[in-house]
């Protein structure tokens, strides 16, 4: 692990930006799959308020110090996570699967915004988000630090939405919380025929309110420690807030909250990503298009992922994935699998809720790698109080080991998307320290 002396990840926009798109009909179709030799290059920790960047090269199991620069104890933990990025481990036919969001080719994927969505507990405060990208854009490594120096004009914009399950506005309130745009994303340093994979944790915390980008998903009471949340929703369309929190908004007046369309007691939320090719956009706002258009016709996309669950063999050479429905107040890992695509005002729903793998290929789950981190872990409980009963005892250790053995990412105490010795060590250390 090493501190980055120069930026390979430049934040150029943040907070409250609306990615406006008109919606058409829901038209489910099969999610296309790309395959290639993906090399995981590095993980980048980026603190928005301080500008701190810490790079951890792939294969280095050490983790960045995610404490606030001012020394505040935030006790962060994952509150929503889909981090397992191999959707079909039972089938291996070479190459890692991923979804190409943009390749800028004629008739290909150009300028799409991909919306992914899920369920989460009400009043979930988020102070760090996990993002990732896979790209074939050739890059250099002039400083020999092991990662790309940054492809000029290659950008990615991630937006987080309240009350969005990918459906139409009349049955989903859908309001943006924050949007972050990164320019000059690092790219592929391995040459043609390879794709480079990067992951990043974007730390939104700050002890100064004006520097903080923390947000709350599913506000129900109008009270929050987060900087951004919706507690004054315009439910009647007159442009004036009606003093209604997002969790209670009913814009189609059917007597049901728009934020829980499936009635499972969890709040609907979504996140979207849009990539910008070199030579196509002015990412830094200086009036000049960034990058060389000749470098633009390369693919960039995101990894498929799968939530917690179990494989079920169908007896015919195929497998399906059974996903548990989380109870209210649970972590909400992976519920509501589905995605939507937006382009030129059009909206298309994609195949979701089904994962089938065969020796000939697979129908991927409509879910992409993502994680939300919040203060204190999930559901407002102390992170090591696994059963959330207010006590630390043998039952919490037993439950942790059970989750670890099952491969459940609730046991991912380091937040790196992997379960290994470091998670056990981190849990035991936190357990011995005790809860506040």
Image (tube, grey):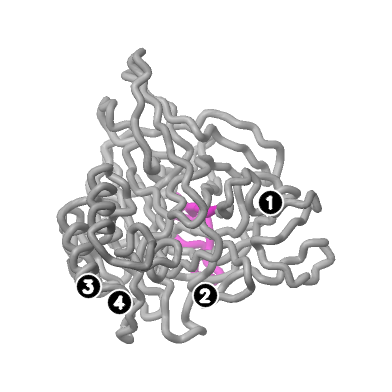
Is there CB contact under 8 Å for labels 1 and 2?
no
Q: Which mark is residue 3?
A: 3
Q: Which mark is residue 172?
A: 1
Q: Earlier in the sequence, mark 1 or mark 2?
A: 1
Q: Which image quadrant for residue 262? A: top right
Q: Which residue is mark 4?
A: 67
Q: Closer to the camera: disc 1 or disc 3? A: 1
Which quadrant: the N terminus?
bottom left
In three-dimensional space, the C-alpha distance between marks 1 and 3, rounded to whole angstroms, equals: 42 Å
At x 68% / y 46%, what residue is drawn? 345
In three-dimensional space, the C-alpha distance between marks 3 and 2, rounded to whole angstroms, equals: 28 Å
Is there CB contact under 8 Å for labels 3 and 4?
no
Q: Say what secondary structure mark 4 lies in.
A: loop
Q: Say what secondary structure mark 2 lies in.
A: loop
Is there CB contact under 8 Å for labels 3 and 2?
no
Question: Which residue is nearer to you in this view: 254 or 182?
Answer: 254
Q: Which residue is mark 2?
A: 226
Question: Which residue is nearer to you in this view: 82 or 184?
Answer: 82
For this view, does 103 lie left or right of residue 92?
A: right
Question: Which residue is nearer to you in this view: 361 or 327?
Answer: 327
In three-dimensional space, the C-alpha distance between marks 1 and 2, rounded to whole angstroms, equals: 23 Å
Is there CB contact under 8 Å for labels 1 and 3?
no
In three-dimensional space, the C-alpha distance between marks 4 and 1, rounded to whole angstroms, equals: 36 Å
Is there CB contact under 8 Å for labels 4 and 2?
no
Please report the bounds of the magenta region as a residue range.
Answer: 270-293
At x 52% / y 43%, what residue is drawn? 336
Asked whether residue 186 is in view, the answer is yes
Looking at the picture, does residue 361 appear above or below residue 115?
A: above
Q: Earlier in the sequence, mark 3 or mark 2?
A: 3
């Amino acid at each position: 692990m090493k501190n980055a002396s120069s930026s390979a990840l430049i934040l150029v926009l943040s907070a409250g930006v609306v990615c406006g798109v008109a919606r058409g009909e829901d038209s489910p179709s099969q999610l296309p799959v790309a395959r290639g030799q993906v090399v995981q290059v590095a993980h980048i920790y980026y603190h928005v308020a301080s500008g701190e960047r810490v790079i951890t090269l792939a294969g280095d199991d050490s983790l960045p110090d995610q404490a606030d620069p001012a020394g505040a104890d935030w006790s962060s933990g994952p509150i929503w996570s889909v981090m397992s990025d191999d959707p079909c481990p039972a089938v291996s036919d070479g190459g890692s699967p991923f979804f190409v969001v943009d390749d800028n080719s004629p008739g290909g994927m150009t300028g799409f915004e991909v919306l992914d969505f899920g369920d989460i507990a009400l009043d979930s405060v988020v102070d760090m988000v996990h993002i990732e990208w896979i790209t074939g854009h050739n890059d250099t490594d002039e400083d020999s630090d092991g990662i790309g120096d940054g492809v000029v004009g290659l950008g990615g914009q991630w937006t987080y939405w309240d009350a969005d399950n990918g459906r139409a506005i009349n049955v989903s309130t859908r309001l943006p919380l924050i949007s972050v745009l990164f320019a000059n994303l690092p790219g592929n340093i391995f040459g043609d025929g390879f794709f480079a994979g990067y992951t990043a944790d974007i730390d939104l915390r700050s002890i100064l309110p004006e520097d903080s980008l923390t947000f709350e998903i599913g506000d129900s009471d109008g009270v929050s420690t987060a900087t951004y949340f919706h507690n004054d929703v315009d439910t009647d369309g007159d442009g004036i807030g009606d003093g209604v929190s997002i969790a209670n908004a009913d814009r189609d007046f059917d007597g049901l909250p728009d934020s829980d369309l499936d009635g499972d007691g969890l709040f609907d939320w979504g996140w979207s990503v849009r990539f910008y090719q070199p030579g196509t956009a002015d990412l830094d706002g200086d009036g000049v298009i960034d990058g060389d258009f000749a470098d633009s016709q390369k693919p960039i996309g995101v990894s498929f992922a799968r939530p917690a669950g179990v494989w079920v063999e169908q007896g015919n050479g195929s497998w399906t994935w059974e996903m548990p429905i989380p109870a209210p107040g649970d972590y909400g890992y992976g519920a509501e699998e589905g995605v939507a695509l937006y382009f030129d005002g059009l909206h298309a729903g994609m195949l979701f809720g089904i994962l089938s793998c065969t020796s000939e290929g697979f129908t991927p789950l409509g879910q992409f790698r993502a994680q939300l981190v919040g203060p204190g872990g999930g559901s407002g409980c102390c992170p090591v109080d696994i059963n959330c009963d207010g006590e630390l005892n043998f039952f919490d250790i037993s439950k942790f080991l059970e989750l670890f053995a099952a491969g459940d990412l609730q046991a991912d105490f380091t937040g790196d998307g992997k379960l290994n010795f470091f998670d056990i060590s981190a849990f035991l250390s936190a357990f011995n320290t005790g809860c506040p």
